[in-house]
Amino acid sequence: MTERSLTRSAAMMKAVGWATLVVVPLMALAFPAGFLWGMSPESPHHPPLSPYAWMLVAMYVAWAILMIRGAGDPIANKAIVDYGILANLLHGAVMFVQSFVYVHEMQHLWGDVPLLFVICAVMWVWHPARVAVGTATGSSRR
């Protein structure tokens, strides 16, 4: 049962990694919400083609590549999943607060913030250390 659960953990790492690797850059190019919001005069925090947004794209692409590579040995690379949970949770929390502080950031509440929290939940449920311990002790976590 442990091997099957670790296989699912590896699949989660690959799926999250590939989805992030493909979706984040495409969304930045095809639907540059941050860039579009930055084009309005009342939104000085996101200038068009903001270097801030591209920095986030670069960070997520790097993390996605590590998730895909780490899927080969989920237990040995569980820190990549830990980082993903923590970074996405903190990123979502900061964006949640900023949505109420900066009126022009409210759009994040309808897309980015819930998605970041869903990614955290998926990674938590299929965390390699959790599924390995859960199956080794005989408890079922589904």
Image (cartoon, grey):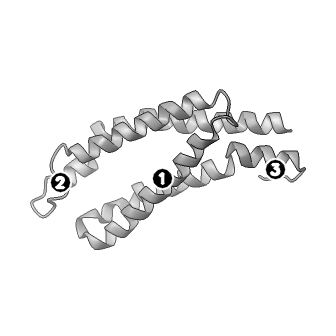
Residue that carries the numbered disc 3 in the rendered image: 134
114 relative to 51 in the view: left or right: right
Q: Secondary structure at mark 3?
A: helix
Residue at (28% x, 46% y) in the render: 53
Q: Secondary structure at mark 2?
A: helix
Label 3 environment density (alpha carbons within 10 Å; few <14, some 14–19, many ≥20): some
Say which label, 1 or 3, has the lower sequence index. 1
Q: Could you tell me how far apart the alpha carbons at marks 1 and 3 are, in whole angstroms? A: 24 Å
Numbered badge on residue 88: 1
Q: Are marks 1 and 3 in contact (CB under 8 Å)?
A: no
Give the percent coordinates (x, y) of residue 4.
Answer: 80, 35
In front: mark 2 or mark 3? 3
Residue that carries the numbered disc 2 in the rendered image: 38
Give the percent coordinates (x, y) of residue 120.
Answer: 56, 53
Q: Amino acid at mark 2?
A: Gly
141 relative to 82 in the view: left or right: right
